[in-house]
Structure formats: C-alpha cells, structure tokens
Amino acid sequence: MSIEIGALGPGPFEELARSAALHGQEPIESTSERELLVLWLDDDPYALPVERVREIVRWRPITPVPRVPAAVRGVLSLRGEIVQVIDLRLRLGLAPSLAEGRRRRIVVLHGDDGQMTGLLVDRVSEVLRLRDEELRAPTGRDAGTVVALAPQGDRFVSVFDVDRVLDLGVGA
Amino acid sequence: MHHILIVEDSPTMRSLVVSALEDIGLPVRISEASSGFEALRELPRGDYDLIVTDINMPDINGLELISFVRRNAAYRSIPLLIISTEGSERDRERGLELGADAYLVKPFDPAALRRTAKELLEKARGE
Amino acid sequence: MAARRTQKPARNRATREFVSEVEEILERMRADLSDLADARAGGRLDPELANRLFRSAHSLKGIAGMFGFEGVSDLAHHMEDILDGLRMGRLPPGAPALALLDEVVEVVAGLLGSGEGELAAGARAQVQALIERIVASLASEAPPAADDDLDGIDASILRALTEYEEHRLRESLRAGRAIHLVEASFEILSFEEGLSELTGSVRALGEVLSTLPAPGDSPDSQIRFSLLVATECDAAELGSRIDLPNAMVRAMRASRATPTQPGSAAPAASAPTELLRDASPGESPRADGGSEIESLKSISETVRVDIRKLDELMNLVGELVIQRGAIGSLADRLLADPATARAGLELSKLHKSLERRLTDLQAGVLEVRMVPLRQVFEKLSRVVRRLRRDLGKDVRLDIRGGDTELDKLIVEQLADPLMHVVRNAFDHAIEPAADRASAGKPAEGSIRLEALQRGNHVVIEVADDGRGIDPEAVRQRAHTLGLIEQDAVLSRKEVLDLIFAPGLSTTTEVTETSGRGVGMDVVRENVTALGGIVHVDSQPGRGTTVVFTLPITLAIIRALTVGVADQRFAIPLTTVLETMLVDPVAIQRSEGREFLTLRGEPLPLRRLHAEFGLPSPPAGARVAVVVVGLGDLRLGLVVDHLEGQQDAVIKPIQGPVRSVRGIAGATELGDLGTVLVLDVASLVEDAAKRREAA
C-alpha cells in the first residue's frame, strides 16, 4: 500500500556534515557550491542554507502562545499564514537579546514538512558562497545544532542544521 | 533624505540589499518592488535618487526596466545600479550599454554595495 | 476543530517531501504527455503544453541535482533538449519523440523507486543508453538555417533582450516563425489588467519573447508596451485576433512558408479550434463556424484569477466587516443621547444597508472561489486510462457529479487523497479477471466516482465492485501492530475504521502503481485538515465504498473576542451559550474548585489565566464569564473582559510545535493583529476529566 522510502540517499544536510567530517581524510570530488545566509547573535556569525529561507522580515509584534517551550516567542501572520517564531538566542540557551530592535530580523524558513517557521535573530548580513571542501567539522559536541564551520575571511561561521534547530523535542 | 528603489524578485536577496543600504551612513528611505511590473507602478509614486535592480525577473527583465527608465524624461537622470548573478556577463554589459551606471555581482559584499550606492547618490546630488 | 494541526511522522520528512514532489512532477508530465499525444492526433502541437513540459523537466533537473540523484538530473537535462526541440518545431512532434519522452519518464520513476542517489552499474548503463538515444534523435534534426541574422527587428528591442530571450528569438527565426511587434498603451496605474489580457490573447497564437515598456504619449499617466511575438500567423491575422481597441501589430519578419526541416509535421500553428481547446479544456470545439464565434465570445467573458488575489479580497472583506461593526456601535452611542439621536438614526439606517451589502459581497467572494470537481475527476480518469493500458487490467471508471462545486483550495488539496483511494481500488480491490469470473462477476471491474451536494457539505463516494475488505484480516493486522487487544469487542464499523490507523494496510504487496507512498492514515489526515471526514464501508466479495464528506467553503466562523491579562483570544460563537459579568463575591468554591450558581444549577468555572499561565486580575475586580457547552457538558471560562464579535477565518499554526492543547488555530483580526482561537472542545473535556479524577 505504500512505498518504503527509508532507503533513499542522504539529504543535503547529512551530506554537508559528512563533507565537513571527512575533510582531509579522503579526497572529495564534489565541487558543488553552497549558498549560506549569514546571520548574527551578538558578534558571533552563524549561517544556514539559503534554499531553506523563504523570506526575511523586520521585527514586528508577536502574539504569545501559551503552553509552548520558552524558545517559541509566539506566532505572527505572514500574508494570511500563521507561523511560529523561535527566538534563536533562547533556542541556543543564550541570554535574551540586547541588540536594538531596528536590526532584528525574522528569517522565515521552509520546514522539512512544508511548514513555515520564523527564526528571530539579531541581524542578517549577507550570502556566503562556498564549496563543500572548504567546510570544517564543528568543534562542539556531537548532535548539536551546528554541523559544520565555514571559513569567512580569517574567521569561521557556524553552519546550522536547520532541522535540528527547529527540533524542539516536542510534538511530531 | 535619499529615496532608493530596490527591484528584486527574490525576497531573501531583497532583504539583504535593504539591510546593507540601511546602514549606508546617509539618511535614506527605501522602497521595494518584487518584480519589474511593480517597479513600473512604483516609479511615478516616489522621487527616486537611486534604483537598484536585478536582471532576471519573471514579468519584465531588468534590461527592459533600464531601457524604460532611460527613455523616460522624468526618470532619465536617476542613477541605476545592477545587481545580477555570476555568469550573466553579457546581460550586465547590455545593461551598461542601455545606461546603467554600475553593477555588482551576486553574492555581493555589503560594504561594496554601500560604497557604490553612496558614490552614485552623492554624484547625483553634486550634479 | 477543523484547523487543528495534524500529526506527521518526523522520520525522513525531507526525503519524503522530495519523493512526493518528484512524483507530482512525473504525474504532471505523464498527464501532459498523454494530452500532447491526444492533441497531436489533430495534427498539431500545443506550444503551451510543450512549454509546461519543458518547465517540469527543468524543475525536476534542479531538485534531483540537489538530492544527489545524478541519473535523474542528467535525464531531465536531456528531456529539456527534446522538449526545447519540440516547442521550437526543430523536432517533429511524432510518435518516436513522444515515446522516447514516455520512456524517460518511466525510467526516472524507476530510478526514484530504487531509492539510490548513486546509480547501480545496471541503471547507469540504462541511463547512458537512453541518453545516447536522445542525443542521436536530436542529431538527426536538420542543421539550423544559416539565415538567423536579426535584420528587421527594432534595435531598441534587441538591445533589451537577455541572453535567453535572444536565444529564443534566434530559435524562432530558425523555425521559420514570423516575428511581430504588438504595441498598446495603458494607464500607468492600472496597466497590469489590460496587459495581461493582451498577453493572454497573444499567447494563444504564439510565444511572447519580450515585453518592453516605454513612456506613453503623456508619460505622466501612460505607459506603452511592445510585445515581441513569435508566431505562425501573419500580422493581419494576429491583429484580427486581438480584441483590444488600441493595440497595433507591426510585422518585423514574415514566416517562412515551408519549414526548414524536411519531414517535419505541421508546426505549432493555432487554428481557431486550437484556440478553443486552449481556453476551455475538456470541451470539444464545435464544428460549425457560427457557434465558433459564439464560443470565442464566451472566452473573453471569463477571467483567470490568481487564488492569492481572492485570499486578499477575502481578507479585505473581513476588515470591512470589522469596520462596519465600529460604525454600528457609533450609531448606537449617537442614538442613546437625545442631542444626537437624529443623526444616530440616519447612521443606523446606513449601517443596516451597509450590512446587507457586505453580506452579499462576502457571499460573492466565496462564490468566486468555487470550482467544479470536474478537473480533478478528469485527472483521475486519465490515470485510470493509463493504468488500464499499462497493466492490461480491465477496469471502468464511471464519473458522476463533476459539476459539483467546492472551494478551489479544498479541491486542490483533495486531488491526492482521491487519487490514492482510486489507485487502491484499481490495484488491490479489483480482482484479476480469472477470480472475477469464478466469483460470477462481469470481467470488467468497475470503479464509481460520484459527487453530490448535501446542504453545506459535498459528499464524494469512491465505490468499487472488487473483493471487499476482510474484517478478520484487518483485526489480525491491527492486533499484530498492537493497535487493539486480541479479544477487543468491536463493531463491524469500528473494525473497518481501523484501516485509517497508521501503518495498517491489508496487503503488504507493493506494486508499481500504488505510488505516492501514502497510506489511508495520510488520506484521513489530509481530509481532516480540510475540516472534512472520511469513512469506509465494505462487503466482502461485493466491494468497498470510501465516502468523503467536506465543507463547501473554508472555515469562516463568527467569534467572540475576549481579553485575558494583556492578551486576546477568540472563542467560536457556535460554542458560546451565554456571557455575563460577574462580581467576584458570587464565585463559590468546593474542594478548591470554583463554580457559580446559574439558574439554580452549579456551573464549574475555569480561569483562562490559570489555564494559560497568565497574570491574574487584581482581587475584587469584576470579571466576565463565557459559558461554553459541548454536548451536555457546560463550563464557564473566566476572562477579564469581553470585546466583541468578529467574523474570523481560522488558520492552522505552522511551525515545530505540532499542537497546543486548548488552541485550535489563529486568526487575523484587522487592527487587533493575530489572535489565538480557543479549542473549546478540548478545554471542556479537560475540565470534565479533572472533575472525574478528583
């Protein structure tokens, strides 16, 4: 009655993590390019894949929702659709933002199930384009939200696995 | 107050351009158009000092928009900046031939965008 | 509540999304290819259809590349080549090209089914062989004519062509099509409607290569557009077909009468009948010339509208309704004061008539969104025809009630669940011919698809005359899966209902046609999300009927808005029995639970502050109580104040938190912003459970 789909190849993010982890251990033939949206919490840059970004909107009043994890700031209406907004700072266990509201942005993401979610960040700056082999493995513990480090000038940008960021350990 | 029109169909890219230009260090007001048609409707509504446009868009393309702006007495002197994707050199050249003032390649460096935009704004004011 | 979020398995959602999108694309390509084959029978190629196929191949190439399905991506890339050749007339739209495309689509489906991004050696060889055949077929086309200079085309237009547009222009010239310029002026503030009408009528006859705007005669208020058009028509013919008084057609290049390629079939011209077919799918063009004119006229009276524009309109109507409410209360205030009573009376009359017209407007907007089910039914019929051909299984699909109308959004969301149920019937329910013969049934199996309207609902039935569902097999499987106890006492209906449980199906067999990777659990989930219900009835040996019941329009409800702390909530008015202001001294307690005496009966209370962890009002403040009911259960919801009634469209909440107990969804209420809608049923149930537990 249904097709078994568990046997399909890895998604882009498993690949990305693998590319980062394998670096230096075996030659990587892929020269595929990735586009990453760079966003900031205080002075720390983070990035997520551009193809997961639906749009970026300015900060606007958010309607709080009861009975949800603290990282969920509430919901807002985007052209008639109601989406949850996650405060990325709270999601990563950081203190609430001190940044001025003018620069704060809500990055609206496509979920892996076609649903949208807003991610509240301090600011966004640019799109970074790089090849898989430039990625490095993250320094943090396994199964965190960061799957790779991407070089930008003389520093590294932490690259998120969007699905892990959106996984609050509730529902589904 | 400098009034800037940004024409870009990708919402992500549009936001990045807006963010970069907000910090330009001049008093600016920014209007956004998500297509060439929207830009055509927007033009008569504002007294623009700079137009920043993409080339590949669904209804009319950036070259057609540039051609329109340069043929219209009311808009002829507005500086025009093209931001287009890598690999469309020929289209960028066409844009300059049609009267655009400068171009940037996506992905762009926000500082370079601010610098170029500022030059264009100040040059237009000086003339 | 209709809008409550439904659960979806988290595992492999990304890949599932990918697979289902590719399957959708392939399904669309199959349908378009079959339409293309039908249309070709009339000796003509529909350029719009070829274009759509081209775009499908393009999307397929993109997403397959992203997921590392290189074989699929390569094949899609080569399909683009074939389709470009077809739509440019470089390739004859003959049986070989179409058969090749059919084959590529099926190979892609196979590669997808194998589930491997990396191709196995056998599959790689298969892909390679196929690609070589494509390359060979393209090489056999005639070399492009040398004559592809662009003389005669306005330089001002040429200069504004992008690389791709110029490529299309050169290809059109190579294909021997005529190039014309269609010019028209519009008011600058409203050019889009007129222009899209113009573009639409030109597209029926050819391809719009470029749309160049220029200042109009009075540049402040007018804008002129020049459309560069490639077509088989001459300028006079094109002009006579464009029904716009100020449009002008200028010929730039005449078409070459003989196509450059020997052996090519008649190129993509558009005879009047072709125009008809484009504009009204599913209706056969009439034969005599007189009614042809009549039909052309009826086309121009129909407008295609983007569904999002209708959503915007509906939101606008919602805002107007809110403002009407404000006018009403202003009239009441004026009436209450003798000094302004006369003005109040006038305003009140105006308000009444405004109310009537707004109600009509609201009904009108909802009506515009209604579309007949016919299109979905026809798609199903195509699928069954194809299955019948491919599998050699003798099954007839009877369709009734295709004219029944539903909201467009609901119709779109219904296509997949219906497809799944029809395929199940075809694959599993209808027995092989030999079994049917021994059961004394006619050799030809039958599936009946019937829609009918019943009040505010539409009922759709999918009935087959196949083997039926064996309740004992369902019971066994449900037990194996741990869904029921071995000795559970269940009615026949309850047993049949188990087929909608996750993971349960009466056969483990996977066939090529079972497709989509969704089970009956997903069918029910999708239908529930639309505010509908689905159930099944079956007689072993006689057949199975699946019944969908759906609301005709979207969930517009009348809601009461209430204030709690600094927040607002909306309560569906259908659940509200009454409201009252209560002095806190009237609230009694028993075992720590609050209640109120209402007409001699105790009414349990629940403070929304406590329910949702919000700050309580100061002690002694007057509160409001909203009495809600569900069945014979009653509950008083304590809030800070009542605000008013609104029309609200309940929308589901998207995001990682799948559902919040007590919240049905949210709605946007004009100036009030986004407001959460209470799920009264779960609040009442929870209160009742707490009482039982105590």
Image (cartoon, rainbow, N blue to C red):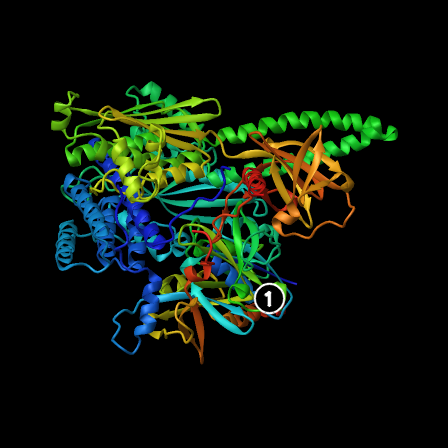
Q: Residue furthest right?
A: C339
Name the residue rendered at 13%, 41% in the picture: C263
- Decide: few, some or many residues near mark 1? Use Cα within 10 Å; few <14, some 14-19, many ≥20: few
Q: Is residue C267 above or below residue C140?
A: above
Q: Amino acid at mark 1?
A: Pro
Q: Is residue C216 left or right of residue C397?
A: right
Spot occupied by residue C481 in the image (x, y as percentages of width and height): 30, 44
Spot occupied by residue B40 in the image (x, y as percentages of width and height): 52, 50
Spot occupied by residue C374 in the image (x, y as percentages of width and height): 35, 28
Name the residue rendered at 40%, 59% in the picture: A51
Q: Secondary structure at mark 1?
A: loop
Q: Is residue A133 left or right of residue A80?
A: left
Q: Which residue is mark 1?
A: A96
Q: Looking at this view, is A95 or C67 the one in front?
A: A95
Is there any visible trace of residue C418 in the rendered image? yes
Name the residue rendered at 68%, 53% in the picture: C615
Name the residue rendered at 28%, 49% in the picture: C57
Q: Looking at this view, is B101 or B24 the one in front?
A: B24
Quadrant housing residue C317 = top right
Spot occupied by residue C138 in the image (x, y as percentages of width and height): 17, 51
